Image (spheres, rainbow, N blue to C red):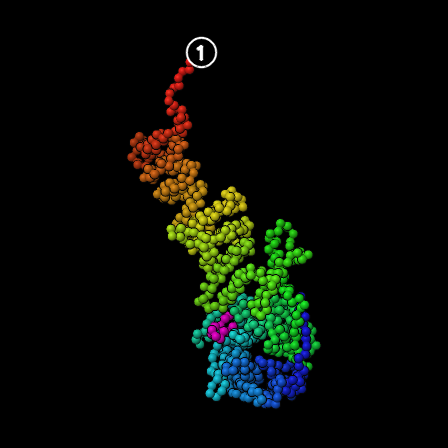
């Protein structure tokens, strides 16, 4: 249900000292005045640049004030103009503040307000060190001032490219000394830089290039983290670019900072920025000339929030932005837009009747928006809907859309499932319940005083582990983005392990498979470690590879989308991905892994089942396909091919391995393989022996192993069968044969005699069939009596 907005007046300036004069100042001048409120909301500062007569001034007004010294500062042109009214935190008293008034030539006045006394000048200081320097932008962060100043070159005829880098960014902190509070020493953050507008959040300073600055430097932003002395380069069109810790002043040189990223940054599109400001969450809000509102986070990432109506924005048209809690308020051309920062949803749009509107701070009231107009101060707040227990509509829609995807994959119908069909009749309420659980759970973490509804307590206890896993994953992603370079690798490994584990415990569809392919391609070593962890792969005490993965994980590894289902777009099935990792990081384990998968398949699917992996392409052939895709072929690959063929224990694969060994002339292993695998089946035994007998007839390489080969002769093979095989495979003589050849590689009867003797002396199968009859007590049988 949509929240309704209520606008009410909270002040008509009667509660301000000199309230009538405040109202007059707001109504004077052709250009809008600049209004700024103090952090506690008790003071208003009005800056008028052009007023009749043209004498700029700044005036402070106190709320609920009594007679005390007022603050009013005028300056007469050609005196440099005012560039900043900034509030600094008092380093001594928590919650108190001082006011810094900064002029363009660097002169700064520090003022302090004392109750019942009024405004007191604490110090006047020069921020700029050179007489020709000027400040172009300034902001406050905590108890520090941060500014960008121009330092013109001494030579008036300097190169224009060098003149473009005549700016520097400096900072100066408010300190407490014997004489009271004062500004400390100057620290240079960045020198030899282009012109920047500096904007401060509680922990970061954003540096936005001025539109008229050097063209090649207007494609990216800089983000400075004062506590870590770290400078981040980010480009809205490309995301995070680089982060560097500035340990010395030499590293603060702008041109040296960009040396490693010049190629990337030079090809990016220039920034399109009409208005920029900092949100209360610490991000940078950017409004483009096309009206697009985007948020740049302190880690360098960017997300789109909203598109303002009205087409392209003119250069002079003001856009005011202010965040109140999770709400973004925007005033453009007399229209107030209220936008949810999290979802980008337009909450409310109001046409204002006031000519000039200013946003004010509303301390203690996050959901209340305060507007200053020429007639008073107004508060815009949201009334709670009647049914406040219902979750946000956008959250419900997101859950319903996810539910549609989930059930569409399992539906036997060809018609597309929509959110409307799922909601029709109110028969499917699970997404609504899930959305409510998520919403109440997050609210409970943020505000412990609000308890969870009893209706969802049991369901939430069931989902608690999933919610904790989700929250820890999001926290880990944040750590990866914000971590120093030395810790990024360990965080990435942990993140990849969580992501691989999450996908392996969800539906292995084409989208998830493509996501896993991208993970294995981007983080190969981390993906390999995650695979070992998810499958629980390790060697036992005997050196054998064992896996303690659950049956569900095995089914995802072996039963996901196959190559014919995923197409030819570079995505490979999960089994092939894992085999590729084995080949890259632990090739000796690959045959054992294939053997483990075959053992699982034999227990889970029937041998001839078309649904199982072995019913399509045998696993050993899939592993061989991965091996064949390697760019370079080596002797180790031949050995790996042999191991993969033999570990399958399939007759065709064993015979293929035997032929490969014969081609490589590894006769010792030929005999070992024959001796080992002849025991699997009589048919395989006959094929192996016939193959080796044919080799024996052609050359003398197997002669040293005849004592091992002859016992492998199958029982059904006769002497005539043996002689037939030998005669068929005798090598063709190059010349007419002679009775006694001097060459020692010819087959002789003496070499074949032991085998023939073994076969002849072995009892025949037919003899065994009639052995009972032959062992009769009387043979031949007695003659039957004749009939007379």
The secondary element bearing badge 1 is classed as loop
Image location (x, y in percent) of residue 193: 50, 76
Residue, x 56% and y 86% (percent of image)? 113
Q: Position of residue 237 (x, y in %)?
A: 55, 67
Q: Which residue is mark 1?
A: 787
Q: Is residue 697 visible?
A: yes
Relative height, residue 95 to residue 586 (above, below): below
Q: Is residue 158 above or below residue 540?
A: below
Q: From this viewpoint, which residue is outermost toward the right?
A: 353
Q: Residue at x 40, y 39 (%)?
A: 678
Residue 232 located within the stretch drawn in magenta? yes
Left or right: residue 274 versus residue 525 is right
Name the residue at 62% across, 78% down: 360
Q: Quadrant of the C terminus?
A: top left
Residues rendered magenta in the picture: 223-233
Say whether residue 576 is magenta: no
123 vs 665, nearest the viewer: 123
């Amino acid at each position: 249900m949509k929240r309704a907005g209520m606008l009410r007046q909270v002040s008509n300036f009667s509660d301000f000292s000199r309230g009538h004069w405040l109202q007059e100042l707001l109504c004077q001048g052709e250009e809008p005045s600049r209004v700024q409120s103090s952090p506690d909301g008790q003071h208003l500062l009005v800056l008028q640049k052009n007023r009749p007569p043209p004498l700029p001034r700044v005036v402070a007004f106190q709320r609920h004030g009594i007679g005390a010294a007022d603050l009013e500062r005028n300056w007469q042109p050609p005196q440099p103009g005012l560039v900043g009214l900034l509030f600094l935190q008092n380093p001594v008293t928590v919650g108190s503040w001082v006011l810094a008034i900064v002029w363009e030539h660097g002169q700064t006045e520090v003022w302090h307000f004392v109750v019942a006394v009024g405004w007191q000048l604490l110090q006047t200081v020069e921020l700029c060190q050179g007489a020709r320097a000027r400040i172009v932008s300034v902001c406050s962060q905590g108890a520090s001032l941060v500014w960008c100043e121009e330092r013109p070159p001494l030579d008036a005829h300097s190169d224009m490219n060098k003149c473009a880098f005549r700016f520097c960014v400096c900072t100066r902190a408010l300190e407490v000394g014997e004489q009271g509070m004062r500004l400390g020493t100057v620290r240079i953050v960045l020198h030899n830089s282009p012109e920047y507008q500096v904007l401060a959040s509680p922990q970061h300073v954003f540096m936005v290039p001025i539109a008229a600055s050097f063209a090649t430097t207007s494609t990216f932003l800089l983000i400075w983290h004062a506590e870590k002395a770290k400078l981040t380069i980010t480009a809205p069109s490309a995301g995070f670019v680089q982060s560097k810790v500035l340990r010395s002043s030499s590293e603060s040189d702008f041109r040296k900072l960009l040396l490693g990223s010049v190629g990337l940054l030079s090809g990016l599109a220039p920034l399109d920025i009409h208005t920029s400001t900092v949100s209360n969450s610490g991000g940078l809000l950017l409004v483009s000339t096309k009206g697009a509102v985007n948020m740049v986070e302190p880690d360098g990432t960017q997300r789109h929030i909203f598109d303002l109506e009205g087409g392209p924005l003119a250069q002079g048209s003001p856009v005011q932005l202010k965040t109140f809690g999770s709400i973004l308020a925007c005033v453009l051309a007399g229209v107030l837009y209220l936008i949810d920062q999290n979802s980008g949803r337009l909450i409310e749009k109001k046409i204002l009747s006031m000519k000039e509107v200013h946003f004010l701070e509303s301390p203690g009231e996050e959901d209340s928006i305060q507007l200053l107009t020429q007639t008073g101060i107004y508060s815009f707040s949201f009334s709670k809907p009647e049914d406040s227990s219902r979750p946000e509509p956008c959250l419900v829609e997101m859950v319903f859309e996810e539910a549609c995807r989930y059930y569409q994959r399992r539906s036997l119908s060809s018609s597309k499932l929509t959110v409307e069909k799922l909601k029709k009749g109110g028969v499917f309420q699970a997404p609504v319940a899930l959305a409510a659980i998520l919403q109440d759970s997050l609210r409970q973490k943020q505000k412990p005083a609000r308890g969870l509804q009893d209706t969802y307590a049991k369901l939430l206890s069931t989902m608690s582990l999933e919610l904790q896993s989700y929250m820890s994953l999001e926290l880990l992603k944040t750590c990866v983005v914000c971590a120093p370079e030395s810790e990024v690798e360990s965080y990435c490994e942990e993140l990849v392990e969580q992501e691989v584990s999450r996908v392996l415990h969800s539906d292995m569809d084409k989208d998830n498979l493509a996501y896993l392919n991208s993970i294995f391609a981007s983080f190969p070593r981390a993906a390999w470690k995650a695979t070992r962890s998810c499958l629980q792969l390790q060697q036992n005490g005997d050196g054998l590879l064992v896996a303690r993965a659950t049956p569900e994980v095995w089914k995802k590894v072996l039963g996901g989308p196959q190559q014919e289902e995923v197409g030819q777009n570079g995505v490979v099935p999960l089994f092939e991905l894992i085999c590729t990792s084995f080949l890259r990081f632990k090739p000796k384990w690959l045959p054992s892994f294939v053997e483990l998968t075959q053992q699982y398949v034999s227990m889970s699917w029937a041998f001839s089942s078309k649904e199982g992996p072995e019913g399509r392409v045998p696993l050993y052939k899939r592993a061989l396909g991965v091996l064949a895709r390697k760019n370079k072929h080596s002797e180790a690959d031949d050995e790996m091919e042999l191991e993969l063929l033999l570990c399958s224990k399939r007759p065709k694969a064993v015979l293929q391995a035997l032929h490969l060994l014969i081609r490589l002339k590894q006769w010792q292993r030929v005999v070992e393989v024959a001796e080992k695998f002849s025991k699997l089946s009589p048919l395989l035994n006959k094929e192996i022996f016939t193959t080796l007998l044919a080799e024996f007839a052609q050359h003398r390489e197997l002669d040293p192993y005849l004592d091992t080969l002859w016992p492998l002769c199958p029982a059904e093979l006769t002497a005539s069968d043996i002689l037939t095989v030998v005669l068929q495979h005798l090598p063709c003589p190059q010349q007419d044969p002679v009775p006694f050849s001097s060459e020692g590689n010819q087959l002789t009867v003496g070499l074949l005699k032991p085998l023939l003797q073994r076969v002849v002396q072995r009892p025949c199968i037919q003899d065994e069939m009639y052995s009972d009859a032959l062992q009769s007590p009387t043979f031949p049988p007695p003659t039957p009596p004749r009939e007379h």
